[in-house]
Amino acid sequence: MIDIAIGIDIGGTNTVFSGITSDGECLVSGVIPTQTKDRFEDFIDDLILNIKQIVDSSNDELNIIGVGIGAPNGNYRTGTIDKAANLRWKGKLELVRLVEERLKVPVKLTNDANAAALGERMFGGAKDMSDFMVITLGTGLGSGIVVNGDLLYGHDGFAGEVGHIIMRPGGRECGCGRRGCLETYVSATGVKRSAYKMLAKHMGESSLRNIPYHGLTAKMVADAANEGDLLAMEIFAYTGKMLGEALANVAAVTSPKAIFFFGGLAKAGDLLFEPIREALEKNILFLYKDKISLLPSELGDDAAVLGASALIWNDKLN
């Protein structure tokens, strides 16, 4: 019999799950839509049914030792999802209790960026690191911070929200209700907003002018920049500069050995990494200069479920 931890990633559109071994091998996996059930309990029932069916149908005899879950606003300390803006179910959702009742195994929960940080430490590039940070660059900006070998949770379970550092007081409106948060500038959504601001400000030629607002994506901006579009290159320089400035401030508090980047926007590569690195070194306190590595995540497309499963394997193996 093979022991597996079930890693679950609850996203706004789909929920992905996998059965992960202690060495990071994915033996079974599945996906269900997240937002089709009116009641949260019905979504959980559907999820558990699918997990059991896929595990039972495996050619291997599998033993579930626990379930790790990454979810928006997932609170490690309470086991609840608290007021997640991109989920249809509002208030405090008793996720851990509901899954434990149905599967009768230990269940742990955190947010998706914290899960990615745990996965990077157990299965990725941070295996030998006790102090590092993972920045997830998708629709928003998430962050998982590891200090002295432990994830930074804070007294209420919500510490480490780098995406909600105020970078421009009174600036762009954020989904959190404030203005000027980092993720309104540094994220796929932020790149799109920057593109239209710069298109209105500059009259130069750009292939981006031919794309309607709702059709534009950060990948299109990246592709244009890689083809030499000057406006698109300026957008990424602006985005990377702001992230580098923010990370210089965060580094003064946590002193990470490395910062790993994961998510669709991170795939822009040097287009983003170079201005981040330049701004980080320009603004960082002299004590930390040339000490912090900026690295792509080594977890690939399975980062979310690998990280979630690491919530279980981390406790089991240590």
Image (tube, rainbow, N blue to C red):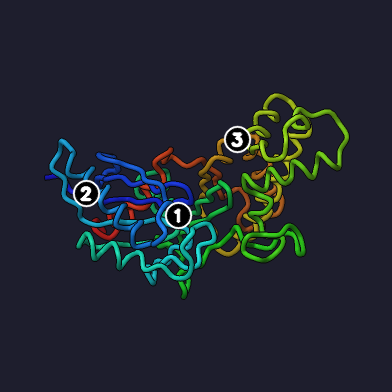
Residue 145 in picture, x, y percent from top left: 49, 59
User: For the view shown, which residue lies furthest in the front direction?
Assistant: 38
Q: Is residue 93 above or below residue 212?
A: below
Indicate which disc residue 268 carries.
3
Q: Residues within 10 Å of mark 1 (few under 14, many from 20)?
A: many
Q: Residue at x 24, y 45 (%)?
A: 21
The number of numbered discs placed on residues in the rendered structure image is 3
Q: Position of residue 16 (x, y in %)?
A: 37, 46
Amino acid carrying label 2: it is Lys
Residue type, mark 3 in image: Ala
Q: Earlier in the sequence, mark 1 or mark 2?
A: 2
Disc 1 secondary structure class = helix
The residue that mark 1 highlights is 112
Left or right of 158? Residue 43 is left
The amino acid pointed to by label 1 is Asp
- Residue 178 shown left or right of residue 317 in the figure: right
